Image (cartoon, rainbow, N blue to C red):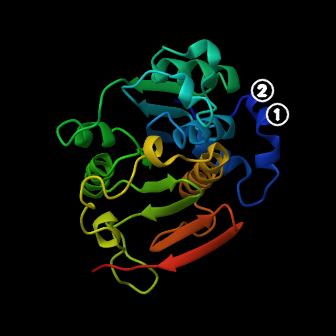
Amino acid sequence: MTTTLTADEIERYARHIVLPEVGGAGQQKLKQARVLVIGAGGLGAPVLEYLAAAGVGTLGIVDDDTVSLSNLQRQVIHDTDTVGKLKTDSARAAIARINPNTAVETHTFRLSADNAPALVARYDIVVDGSDNFETRYTVADACASARKPLVHAAVGRFDGSVTVLKPFGVGKDGKPNPGYRDLFPEAPPPGLVPSCAEAGVLGALTGVVGTLQAMEAIKLITGIGEPLVGRLLLYDALAARFETIRYGRR
């Protein structure tokens, strides 16, 4: 894919290009970027929408599920007319309406330890919007092995968290960056952490946290700001409060 911006793209991304921190060079980086999004659900929906609108050149979507009516309270990339359709197909159609310049690669299967390494290797950055610990560990291990930055998030009821994982790099202090297993050494016992279907989740919460993930991905692509490496951003929606916890390599 050529990184040259067309006249249409220059107009479309004018509010980015006028930012000195982004400019034409940053927009070209976005156009050239390949981002893999795990899940086209509550978190994946805003991630995909904002990365497409931002001009990311290629978006990969991993999801083996179909759209259900109960998804629509939070998975805003889908709508009533797509109930029963594959989420990958529904998301691809929505992205085409948002930005026809963004290419979409769909992967309609469940991510596993067998297929994750080869898939992750094809992309520059991975954004994890999965809803279970098995997939989160699988994605994190594959990204660490392939040396790919991972934007991780989780939500439940009224709370969310976001972090960026680059365990193959070092921080400003010269120490190795932490990985997912430094933050969560092992998964909790089955049944200890209720799923969203069991405990519920406020729809707008996934929009807040997913948008934060998209922001972190854009920062990584363009090289601006300070990504959440070694920092876990916590959001309490009911109290309207953000907190940041630092963590390191064990």
Q: Residue furthest left?
A: 114
Q: CA distance from mark 2 to mark 1?
A: 5 Å
Q: Is residue 188 left or right of residue 30?
A: left
Percent from the top left, x then y, of residue 180?
Answer: 33, 64
**Secondary structure found at label 1:** helix
Vertical side of 215 occupied by 2: above or below: above
The C terminus: image quadrant: bottom left
Percent from the top left, x then y, of residue 206?
Answer: 59, 47
The residue labelled by disc 2 is 8
Number of on-image labels: 2
**Secondary structure found at label 2:** helix
- Please give the name of the residue rendered at 60% of the width and 24% of the height, measured from the top-left corner: 78
User: Could one spot residue 126 in this view of the protein?
Assistant: yes
Task: Please name the amino acid that badge 1 sits on.
Answer: Glu
Q: Is residue 155 left or right of residue 176?
A: right
Q: Nearer the viewer, residue 26 or 85?
A: 85
- Please give the name of the residue rendered at 61% of the width and 55% of the height, measured from the top-left corner: 212
Task: Please name the amino acid that badge 2 sits on.
Answer: Asp
Q: Nearer the viewer, residue 106 or 122?
A: 106
- Please give the name of the residue rendered at 51% of the width and 35% of the height, measured from the top-left corner: 41
The residue labelled by disc 1 is 11
Vertical side of 179 occupied by 23: above or below: above
Vertical side of 163 occupied by 119: above or below: above
Percent from the top left, x then y, of residue 145?
Answer: 24, 55
Percent from the top left, x then y, of residue 92?
Answer: 54, 22
Determine contact: label 2, label 1, CB under 8 Å. Answer: yes
- Please give the name of the residue rendered at 17% of the width and 38% of the height, measured from the top-left corner: 114
Q: Is residue 172 left or right of residue 52?
A: left
User: Could one spot residue 128 in this view of the protein?
Assistant: no
